[in-house]
Image (cartoon, grey):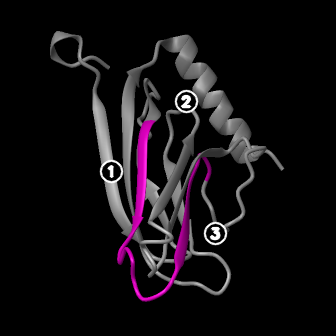
Amino acid sequence: MECYEGATMIKSFRGLIADEGIDTIVLHTNDGSIGYRIVKLNVIGDTPGGPAGFESVIQIWKVPQTTTTSTIDFSDNTLLGVGLWSSSSDTKSYPDDQIVIFDGEIFNQDIYITHDAGAGQSGNCNYYLELEQVKLDLNQNTVATLKDIRNVTAP
């Protein structure tokens, strides 16, 4: 979708998600003619450099999730992106660190963000997500919708 003077429309979402939390980003439309692709993902804990070391895994999914995991599996075609954030109370030796990887795939349905702090840890994590809005023609709309249907109904 184009803005004035050919600029691209970017939608941003942010939130604080609890350990083992799941957020839904509502994107679907009645006709599926608007698609999205991830252009930015940032993650950071709610208390950087806190009293102890901390790690968070934020994952973005194309299908609803019922549980969270800190295991990352890029062979899962329903995974759109991952953000890993780690912090330590010893910031001189172990500065805060962020690793972000996301797919450039276009989707036109809701997405789901999960957070897992890993074994033996708990805490909240912030995320900031930017999506580029893309106008889909009928063929692109059909392909994106069929991919979403396949992901939901796959075993």
Vertical placement of 43 versus 142: above or below? below
Query: Does the magenta segment cover residue 50?
Result: yes
- In this view, which residue lies farthest toward the right? 155
Q: Which mark is residue 148?
A: none
Q: Quadrant of residue 31?
A: top left
Q: Closer to the observer: label 2 or label 3? A: 2
The quarter in which the N terminus is drawn is top left
Q: Which mark is residue 68?
A: 3
Q: Position of residue 44 (x, y in %)?
A: 40, 64
Front-lying residue, 14 or 64: 14
Q: Amino acid at mark 3?
A: Thr
| Amino acid on which disc 1 is placed | Phe
Residue positioned 72% across, 63% down in the render: 71
The residue tagged 1 is 13
Provide the residue span drawn in magenta.
39-63
Residue under label 2, please give it: 104
Q: Position of residue 94 (x, y in %)?
A: 50, 70
Alpha-carbon distance for marks 1 and 2? 17 Å
Q: Earlier in the sequence, mark 1 or mark 3?
A: 1
